[in-house]
Amino acid sequence: MFADFESTKSGFFTLASACIWLGIFNSIQSICKEHDIIRSEYRQGMKMSSYICANIMWQALLCVVQSIIIYGVCIAFGFFKDCPSDGSMMPAVIEYFITIFLLTFGSSVMGIMVSSISGNPTTAMTIMPFVLILQLIMSGVLFELSDFSKVVANITFSKWGMSAFGSTGNMNSLEHVMAIKIPEMAEMIRKQFPTDDVYAHDAGTLITAWLWSLGITVVSAVVSVVSLKIKNRDS
């Protein structure tokens, strides 16, 4: 980490993927396994918005604890040992923790959305791999995105998680591994791989990534409520 651009990008991708994976697993079956109970309670006047909010509040508490554990593991294994101490607008340690929490919590709410749409736990677990694959592909790390895929990437946590991590870690300032290995070709390599604005080391880039993550989380929560209301409209 922080030795060269490629290694740092891979490290951040691993961290972002772990947060998303953990978040989805938190809640992917939390709603669909209780559909019968939800229907019964809904008949007695329970508000779907209150039910979803209660689940989200529990996930928020759970994700705070998980984020502390994830961050502790990262520190224990020296993940942030050589990272710059200054983030884009505050100490890097704070920015990393906020990003880890937003990714884990947002993915948990997304899991609630998938669980709300699914008819049963089996369906939810069938859908989950496709959701994860979409997140991994649209991060922009495994494949270069263009045209329509760039638009789709805007609604994924992986893209904005990578943007936030890259911005905090000032990833654009790192040399590419080939430039380090072949110093005489460094200038040509820099021209071949220009800096990516999505990783810009400034407050605007970081805030944009955080706001997009929050926005996707809110939309996921709204879809969860609407989905449950539609499913139980005849109750």
Image: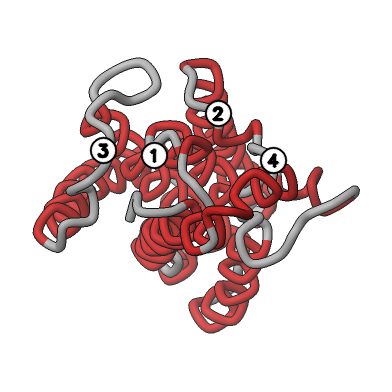
Q: Which of 35 and 62 is in front in this view?
A: 62
Instruction: Residue at 41%, 64% (x, y): give it.
Output: 14
Q: Position of residue 121 (x, y in %)?
A: 49, 77
Mark on residue 124? none
SS for tag 3?
helix
**Residue bearing mark 3:** 97
Q: Is mark 1 on a helix, strand or loop?
A: helix
Instruction: Pick whichever of labels 3 and 4 is earlier in the sequence.
Output: 3
User: What residue is shown with label 1?
Assistant: 102
Which residue corresponds to mark 4?
194
145 relative position to 125: left or right? right
| Labels 4 and 1: the sequence-earlier one | 1
How far is disc 4 from disc 2 in space, using C-alphas? 12 Å
Q: Nearer the viewer, mark 4 or mark 2?
A: 4
Residue at the image position 26 percent from the left and 45 percent from the top: 58
Instruction: Specify the amino acid type for callout 2.
Output: Ala
Measured Cα–Cα span from mark 3 to mark 4:
28 Å
Residue toward you, 20 or 3: 3
Secondary structure of residue under mark 2:
loop
Asked if the residue at tag 4 contacts the one at tag 3, i.e. Cβ–Cβ closer than 8 Å, the answer is no
